[in-house]
């Protein structure tokens, strides 16, 4: 999911030191980031600090930001990195031992999250491999959606993205294990067809081995099945119709997509004014000082 024209324009304005653009970005993403952090950080204060550190980290890495991933994905990558640092720094005191801390950490943060600086240094070959893999996966997902084959999509998402085994998928989806194997086989056939349609250089990219490039990671980084905020809003209002209703419940409850859950929590907080919302003015004031430095660095 590449940066939209609107996001690109917003980032360009921020690079020029535009304070209104910076406030816009905080207003737009602050709630989503706080909702994500609140479900993982030890306390609300820690979650608020993580959001602040994320915005500052974004400005500090602004010179390296490109359009390989969406602006939202980039910000969530930073906050995962900050969350990992938080747990590592506190694992002995707060979690009662290194082993327990590592177990908790693996549940709280994806084990392959990366820092913005490392993302900026990604080799061209690895980027091409990710692009090709994302392209063929996206074609498969869109094809299933266009056919309203959401049952098949659920199976594929559990296998390819969540890493579940056929037997477990069969139990979760309430179907026969042979049916799961058949859906997986047909999906692999379609992926091979889509790959065959790629240019020779693109197909060759997948022959190289990059340990960091996995189907699950590309699926998550590119947000291939993430729900639009409009869909989540309709779900929250109780007006979402089938088959999207069942798929949305599956994506939230079974897959437990962290970004979509954060977006949903943010929308719920918007409806409930008593819910915890980020102090966007405080975030702006605490980070705007980095804006001029970021604009000069860019």
Image: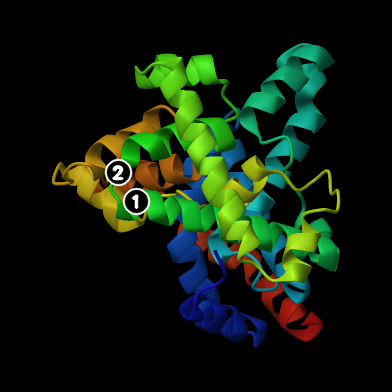
Residue at image location 32% in from the left, 49% down from the top? 267
Q: Estimate the x, y position of residue 41 in percent, counting from the top left.
A: 60, 32
Mark 2: few, some, or many residues within 10 Å (few <14, many ≥20)? some
Q: Quadrant of the N terminus?
A: bottom right
Q: Which mark is residue 79?
A: none
User: As displayed, is residue 183 above or below residue 137?
Assistant: above
Q: Residue at x 46, y 16 (%)?
A: 177
Tell me the SS state at disc 1.
helix
Q: Give percent across and percent down for residue 263.
A: 41, 48
Q: Name above or below for residue 86 compared with residue 280.
A: above
Residue topped by disc 2: 268
The residue at which mark 1 appears reads as: 145
- Relative placement, left or right, of 232 versus 13 is left
Answer yes or no: is residue 260 visible.
yes
**Nearest to the observer: residue 285 or residue 56:** 56
Front label number (2 vs 1)? 1
């Amino acid at each position: 999911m590449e940066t939209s024209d609107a996001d690109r324009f917003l980032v360009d304005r921020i690079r020029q030191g535009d304070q209104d653009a910076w406030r816009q970005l905080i207003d737009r993403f602050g709630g989503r980031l706080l909702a994500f952090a609140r479900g993982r950080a030890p306390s609300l204060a820690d979650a608020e600090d993580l959001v602040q550190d994320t915005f500052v980290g974004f400005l500090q890495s602004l010179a390296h930001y490109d359009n390989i991933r969406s602006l939202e994905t980039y910000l969530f990558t930073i906050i995962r990195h900050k969350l990992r640092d938080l747990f590592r720094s506190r694992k002995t005191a707060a979690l009662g031992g290194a082993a327990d801390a590592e177990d908790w950490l693996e549940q709280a943060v994806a084990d392959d999250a990366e820092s913005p600086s490392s993302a900026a240094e990604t080799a061209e070959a690895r980027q091409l491999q990710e692009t090709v893999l994302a392209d063929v996966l996206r074609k498969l997902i869109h094809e299933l959606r266009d056919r309203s084959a959401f049952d098949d999509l659920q199976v594929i998402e559990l296998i390819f993205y969540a890493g579940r085994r056929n037997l477990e998928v069969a139990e979760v989806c309430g179907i026969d294990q042979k049916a799961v194997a058949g859906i997986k086989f047909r999906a692999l056939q379609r992926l091979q067809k889509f790959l065959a349609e790629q240019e020779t250089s693109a197909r060759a990219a997948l022959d190289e081995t990059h340990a960091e490039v996995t189907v699950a990671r590309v699926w998550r980084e590119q947000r291939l099945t993430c729900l639009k905020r409009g869909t989540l809003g309709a779900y929250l209002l109780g007006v979402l119709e089938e088959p999207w209703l069942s798929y949305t419940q599956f994506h939230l409850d079974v897959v437990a997509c962290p970004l979509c859950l954060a977006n949903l929590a943010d929308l719920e907080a918007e409806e409930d004014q008593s819910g915890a919302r980020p102090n966007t003015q405080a975030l702006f004031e605490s980070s705007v000082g980095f804006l001029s430095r970021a604009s000069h660095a860019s």
